[in-house]
Image (spheres, rainbow, N blue to C red):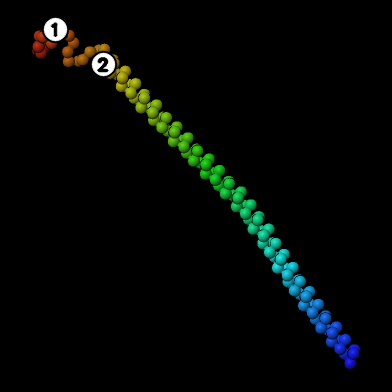
Amino acid sequence: ADEKAEAERTSAMAQKTSMIKNLTQKSKASSMGAADRVAYLEDQQLLMRCLLTWKRDARCDRLRRLGKEKNEKRKKELVGVKGLFKNFANELETSLTKGTPRVDSPKQLRAGPVAD
């Protein structure tokens, strides 16, 4: 009877030990899974930070380039308008120095219209 009770205790002890081992293995596996998830998420966070930084820099460069192009276009338009005004001023000045085609002198003004 003593041996039978000892065998039962040994069997129960082995059963409890195997249950504790299984629980420990499950706990270890789940904690490793959690650690792996944390590592994966940290890697993803680093990649997102790099990507978003690159995206912001690319957007700023694009906007800077577009702004420069717009300013250059405006400068060219202003130079063109300035040239038009200079041409107009020169033409006006030359036409004033030549005189008007209608009247050349004050004598002709007093004489009246010229008969052909």
Image quarter for residue 25?
bottom right
Q: Is residue 42 shown above or below 77?
A: below
Q: Is residue 55 shown above or below 44?
A: above
Q: Secondary structure at mark 1?
A: helix
* Image x and y of residue 48, in percent: 60, 52
Residue drawn at x 31%, y 18% is 90
Q: Is residue 109 shown above or below 14?
A: above
Per the image, the residue denoted by label 2 is: 95
* Image x and y of residue 24, in percent: 76, 71
CA gap, disc 1 to disc 2?
21 Å
Per the image, the residue denoted by label 1 is: 107
N-term mark: 1 or 2: 2
* Image x and y of residue 76, in percent: 41, 29
* Left or right side of 105 for 41: right
| Quadrant in which the C terminus appears | top left
**Residue kind at label 1, given as amino acid type:** Lys
Residue drawn at x 45%, y 32% is 72
* Left or right side of 107 for 17: right
The residue carrying pointer 1 sits among few (fewer than 14), some (14 to 19) or many (20 or more) residues within 10 Å by Cα, namely: few
| Quadrant in which the N terminus appears | bottom right
